[in-house]
Image: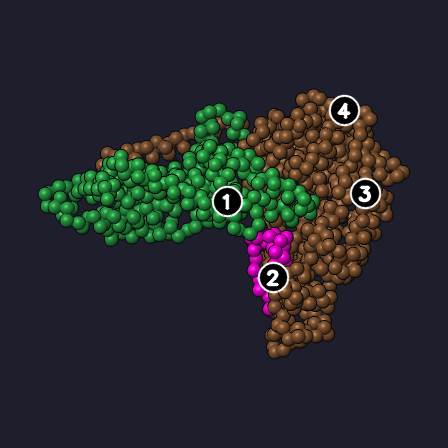
Amino acid sequence: MRIRLGLIYLSAAVAAALVAGCRVNRPAADHAKQQILYRATPSDPRTFNPILITDATSSTLTGDLLESLIRVNPITLLPEAGLAEKWEIAPDNKTITFHLRHDVKWFDGQPVTSHDVQFTLNVIYDPKVPNSFQPILLIDHKPIVSETPDDYTIVMHLPKPFAPLLYSIGIPAIPAHILEPIWKAGNFNHAWGIDTPPDKLIGNGPFHMTRYVQSQVVQYERNNDYWMKDEHGGQLPRLHGQAYSVVQDRNAEYLRYLSGQIDVYGPRPEEVLDLQQKAERKELDITVREIGVDTGTLFFTFNRNPRHYVKNGVTNPKLNWFTDLKFAQAMAHMVDKKSIISLVYHGLAVPAVADISPENKIFHNPDLKDYDYDPKLAADLLEGAGYHLSKPGVRTDPKGNRLEFDLTTNTGTPDRDQMCAIFKQDLEKLGIKVNYRPLEFTTLVDRIDSSFDWDCLLMGFTGGPEPNDGANFYRSSGNLHLWNPFQPTPATPWEAEIDTLLDQGASEMNMAKRPPYYWKIQQILHDQLPIIETVRQKRFASWKNSIENYQPKVWGLYKPEWIQFKAD
Amino acid sequence: MTQFLLRRLLNMIPLILGITFISFLAMSLVPGDFLSNLKMNPTITPEVIKQLQAQFGLDQPLMVRYAKWLWGVLHLNFGISLSYRVSVTSLIESRAVNTIILSASSMLFSWAIAIPIGIIVAVNQNSVWDRVLSFLAFFGMSVPSFFLAFLMMYLALKTGWFPIGGTFSVDYATLDPMSKIADRINHLILPVFVLGISGTAGLMRLMRSQILEIKNSEFVRTARAKGLSERVVIYKHVLRNALNPFITMAGYSLGDLLGGAALVEAVMNLQGLGLLLLDAVRSLDIYLVMGSVLMGTVLLLIGNLLADIALVAVDPRVDYSSVAAE
């Protein structure tokens, strides 16, 4: 036995020697010399098929493979040329003609033509291909009819004037010569899955994919035939390649940035200060910059759905409170945005007033007045509406029911947890009992969507440049009209007004005349308080100083093709 | 023995059916389904959700779906992962190798440390060594492995001796074969240490108590009375008798090989099965979960069987023919 134990130690020693002796022979990883930008992505792609994508990671990872028909400028938020060099809107406001560039080629050398764009539209409208482009490209449930007079012109006939089209038509064109046979054979839903060899992903964008290893890395090389040239006629993009490491854990990603393994990073509030100090003390040669605030919205909302609260002809008193404007105003005055900002976001957030983020410079309504945190005023409002303190710490409605409700949000989001805790504590000072019960996201969605079994909810939505993309939220018949979804006819006059404004805003083709409709919608939501806005986090970006022309905006990178590492 | 094996194998069938059915039921009874995650996306309408439900077969009743899944499994088709849209087999395959390498190395690591230390400590019961090593063992047991993982990542960042997470380097494909192996080993050291150290403590304590128990039994006294040297007594008599529970444990850990390191995987960015399974459960990706459950179950059952067979080989007192005859 002694010999055997000896053997174990001997093999251990050999192993240790191996470990010590094996050296990885590699040229020092020099991102700048290689002109390869290293980044991190929080999860694996779900698919490389641009039409089937429903998650953010997959769209980031396929974004550089395909050029979209038109782009949105991340600074002005206006549509600008992409695959389509220019476009004209006919006087009837229902016909749009797109003129494609003549110099765009697929990676296999085939030209990109109007047939590719038309094919893309056909796939999107195919009911057997469920995808997220379809709803935003259906106008009154009717598809756009397109024709291709020549290889570089595509004419789209809309069923009625529809201004949001210029944002929603930013679809990536897919190669008909590759994918049409697959689509005709009925296999489109399995085309370009994550098991596709990267060289089979035929795109037309600035980079092509060279390698994907599950949960590890996605690598790209520059497309030397890309159509864009810089002001001196130089080939774009300037980077020779890109690599995304899949790093699920945020702390691990941060460590990678600190060690220089990745070149750019979007720091969280608690990391911003740390990075700024490291930059000041010259520990790291990096830039940390505030780039704006969250483009989405994060709000409390109270359930106003009679399908949940009226059972067998008996109305739950909660429905009366939650539809009472005075109650809603009192609640709005109880959201302590200052404390939320300092306690939850380390001061790196701003109060949110309008539902559309101020980052949406076109549609944000800047004239709304915030509901200040004012427990005294809130108490007066409640007293005035008949909600009295029956004994200390217990507030009841005019019929004597104790004010008590459930507050919920999804689990696994510490910032929402803390916000709910702050809101709960404040309401308890008014004698309102709040039961905080966070739920797993899928369970929560089931309650919002099917059983309607919730009282008060802290919920967030991401925002886009086109407010009509949120129509499912604004419209009373929408499935995301959280407080009372799927209404056959609008339950209140102001919900009816929002429905009308949405229709008007969408059919106004003159861009300059559109914003007032959406300002009014924000005004109504602000006055009627179906949603009570909270705060918007500030967004930061950090990058190594060896990178030039890196211009992150909250809506995306500005002129990403110009990014490069400084020459030594 | 043959009869015993046959009975055990037949017994596995109802077990596997039961376990998979209960898991399937549990996954289906959770409110919401895989598509719930899409329902909060403003650009995805209920119509698209319905189309997707039909495409994935989620609109069918539970029993029909289970029967279809089972039928597929009998033909070695484990279904399609809902979130990745590729076959469950290909997803599990690509990660299983990593997980097996990692788990097997950390198991070897902890056994190689725990057993010798367990012996030393038991033989020198109540000595200073016993106290110190037992203290360290309890310490190792009580430090959560994900925390240890964070500490190690910090160490890697500060010293630069080890890579910060991952299974291999970004430029792995361009390396020469020896460097590839070295790169892999280099990435394995910290995870193996983190995963191994938490198992070490338990194993060591087990070894110690086993030996202490047997050391005082009558046959050991007999052996000593025969005048055998202490070395022969310990290694030849005590140790051999102490090994039985370890063989059983080895069998069990075959099932564990593929699961239990999700937290460490997340922190150290290792693409293993644990994290894949955890994500699958959270997003209700039912076929991916079922594939993992099935694999785990089969491995556990086979591991147990192998352990039982190994026991016969090691310990002549164990005899299954009498069990089979009952």
Write down the colour of chain A: brown
Q: Secondary structure at mark 1?
A: helix
- Sequence order check, earlier mark of 4 and 2: 4
Taking the spot 66% from the left edge, 38% from the top edge, the residue there is A130
Tell me which amino acid carries mark 3: Ala
The magenta segment:
A433-457
Dots 4 and 2 on the same chain: yes
Q: Secondary structure at mark 2?
A: strand
Tell me which amino acid carries mark 4: Asp
Taking the spot 66% from the left edge, 36% from the top edge, the residue there is A128
- The residue tagged 3 is A163
Q: Nearest the camera: A251 or A208? A: A208
Q: Which mark is residue B63?
A: 1
Q: Is residue B199 above or below residue A151?
A: below
Taking the spot 83% from the left edge, 42% from the top edge, the residue there is A161
The N terminus of chain A lies in quadrant: top left
Query: Is residue A504 something that shows in the picture?
Result: yes
